[in-house]
């Protein structure tokens, strides 16, 4: 069984844009793996690229699927999802993904509570970015929140200092711009996973930064065996 960045007690940095694309078993669909426990059926976090006209095989999400469309248009029988769309397909959901123009998505598989049946499909403009209370230079677009996790997009103003505590850990993916943290420079498709408890002390780059952040929800107890 493949194990990639499977020690959830450690800080992990992956500059995914520097990684080669790895072909999946489906023609035209490639991946950059961020973490993974399992082989083709896996608890996994990946950046996935669909070539124009590609289609994934129909499948059921035994452990749920969460994704954010980074570019292009992702589609399935439920409709089209342009860049900025956020989707949660809970355990037992089913679909047949495809993309006419091609697309790139951040996707997390098999990381849901087994009893979760909440479906979420937020178009790019569903929420405007709003100023974050008590955080100068930060605006927030909320995506999802429950008792386990908070998911949102944040924009950090150019040069802004961003400090935040994450009692249950966090993951961050850079969507635009860059930031610096612990001596590392994070640019587009750079991913940071912080173990619980964690604190972030970052500084946005000269062009500012847009990031996807998941607070909590890191479920090392879930694996490819979940159904």
Image (cartoon, rainbow, N blue to C red):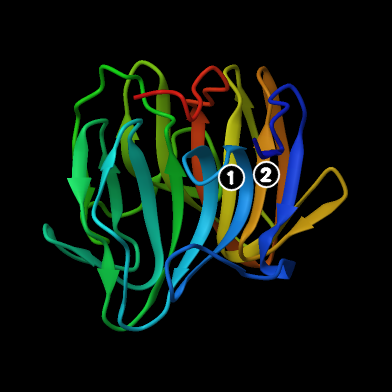
For mark 2, does the 10 Å Cα neighbourhood hold few (<14), some (14 to 19), or many (20 or more) residues? many
Q: Under tag 2, what secondary structure?
A: strand
Q: Residue at x 67, y 17 (%)?
A: 197
Q: Position of residue 126 (x, y in %)?
A: 20, 54
Cα–Cα span, label 1 and label 2? 5 Å
The residue tagged 1 is: 172
Above/below status of 61 relative to 184? above
Q: Residue furthest left?
A: 78
Q: Under tag 1, what secondary structure?
A: strand
Q: Position of residue 180 (x, y in %)?
A: 77, 53
Quadrant of residue 20 in the image?
A: bottom right
Q: Position of residue 122 (x, y in %)?
A: 22, 51
Q: Is residue 77 left or right of residue 190?
A: left
Q: On residue 192, which mark appears? A: 2
- Tag 1 near tag 2, CB within 8 Å: yes
Q: Residue furthest right?
A: 183
Label 1 or label 2, whichever comes before in sequence order: 1
Q: On residue 101, which mark appears? A: none
Q: Position of residue 201 (x, y in %)?
A: 74, 38
Q: Residue at x 27, y 69 (%)?
A: 98
Nearest to the observer: residue 36 or residue 146: 36
In which quadrant will I find the C terminus?
A: top left
In which quadrant will I find the N terminus?
A: top right
Q: Is residue 102 left or right of residue 116?
A: right
Nearest to the observer: residue 41 or residue 202: 41
Above/below status of 93 relative to 149? below
């Amino acid at each position: 069984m493949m194990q990639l960045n499977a020690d959830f007690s450690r800080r992990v940095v992956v500059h995914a844009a520097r990684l080669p694309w790895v072909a999946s078993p489906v023609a035209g669909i490639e991946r950059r793996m961020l973490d993974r426990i399992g082989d083709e059926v896996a608890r996994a976090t990946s950046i996935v690229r669909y070539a124009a006209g590609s289609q994934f095989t129909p499948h059921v999400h035994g452990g749920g699927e969460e994704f954010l469309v980074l570019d292009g248009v992702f589609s399935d029988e439920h409709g089209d999802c342009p860049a900025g769309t956020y989707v949660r397909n809970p355990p037992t959901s089913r679909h047949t993904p495809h993309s006419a123009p091609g697309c790139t998505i951040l996707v997390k598989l098999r990381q849901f509570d087994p009893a979760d049946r909440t479906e979420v499909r937020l178009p790019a403009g569903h929420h405007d970015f709003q100023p974050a209370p008590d955080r100068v230079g930060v605006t927030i677009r909320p995506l999802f929140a429950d008792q386990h996790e908070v998911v949102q997009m944040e924009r950090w103003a150019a040069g802004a200092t961003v400090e935040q505590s994450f009692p249950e850990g966090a993951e961050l993916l850079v969507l635009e711009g860059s930031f610096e943290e612990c001596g590392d420079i994070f640019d587009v498709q750079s991913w940071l996973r912080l173990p619980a408890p964690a604190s972030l002390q970052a500084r946005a780059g000269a062009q500012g930064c847009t990031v996807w952040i998941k607070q909590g929800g890191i479920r090392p107890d879930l694996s490819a065996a979940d159904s």
